[in-house]
Image: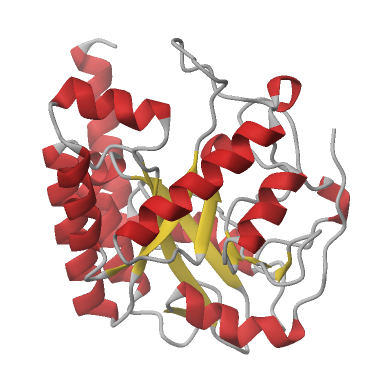
Amino acid sequence: MNNTVRNMLDKLSKAAWYFADSRIPARGCVSYLNICIHSEVIYDDRTYEALIVFSKEFMALTGNRIVICVSTPVCPLVRKGLVERGVSQDEFGRRVSSLAGNAEIGYHGHFYPQGTTTFDHMRRETYDKELVVRQIRDEVKWFEGLGIKPKVYVGGCWFMMEEIVLELERAGITVDVSIRKGKSDTFGGVFLDHGATPDYGVPFILPPTKNILEIQSIFGPVMPPSIMKYHLSGYMRNDNKRSLAFIFPLHDWDLPKYCRNIWANVAELAKHKESIAWMDVLEMREMYMPTAKEGNIGTL
């Protein structure tokens, strides 16, 4: 991309930021939002510092906790990063404990074949149920060593399988944010059949569990507020009669890269109290669980 094109795109972005006026639609009831950080590189100093600042400022502005779902040092790719950055597992644990002061710490599961050197993510054709179950149990034990019992899960690469879901329920997970209606995982597979999945914004019991509430993820709020509101409004217009719930997904490395836009979106949405509100994810579960219905499972 040459400088002329880059400058033009920069000017268009600024114009969208300052002049566009996309409005959140008026609704008969309030819908609820939160952010789930898919955290994989807490060993990176700049990323860790951004997580600390963002979680504190989010709490101060909204009175709510973001969710930071962590891939632990049990995961081969995280261990590799720790070695490359010269960060000890003890230091990594201290950073996660520090983040727990202002954020809900959840679990982010990335699974790789035994003895991998290429870190090619496990997928349906290479799925090793026993290895995955063992890793989930070991990661839950790692969290317990910090005095943390995760309640929220998001799948790495959006990858989900039935035994993963069942093991998560056994481990005490009560909220999942891995499903995106109409979208596959990174490798083209789906856990829930698109046609049988409830609409975005409608929480449901994640099958085949009895106790995990699914709150679907929509899009990462990294664009200017006017564009973000345009996209969010599209999801909200689908249902004007019910209180909806949405999760904005982000990677931890998005925070230092897109901090201006992300924070502007948080602050902008905090103004629209007549239509939307930030809410702790576990409070969402308490609100929606009594009326949630089980979805239908189907795989490719």
* Side of 198 relative to 269 (left or right): right
- Residue 156's x, y, as percent? 52, 39
Q: Is residue 7 visible?
A: no
- Residue 186's x, y, as percent? 60, 29
Q: Which residue is at the front of the view, 2 or 160?
A: 160
* Side of 104 relative to 113 (left or right): left
Residue 7 vs 71, above or below: the answer is above
- Residue 11's x, y, as percent? 23, 36
Which quadrant of the structure image shows residue 85? Answer: top left
Which quadrant of the structure image shows residue 76? Answer: top left
- Residue 253's x, y, as percent? 28, 39
x 57%, y 21%: residue: 113
Residue 3 vs 147, above or below: the answer is above
Residue 185 vs 51, above or below: the answer is above
* Side of 264 relative to 136 (left or right): left
* Side of 182 relative to 273 (left or right): right
Which quadrant of the structure image shows residue 166? Answer: bottom right
x 77%, y 70%: residue: 210
Quadrant into which the C terminus falls:
top right
Residue 180 vs 77, above or below: the answer is below
Count how many numbered circles sit on residues in the image. Answer: 0
Quadrant into which the N terminus falls:
top left
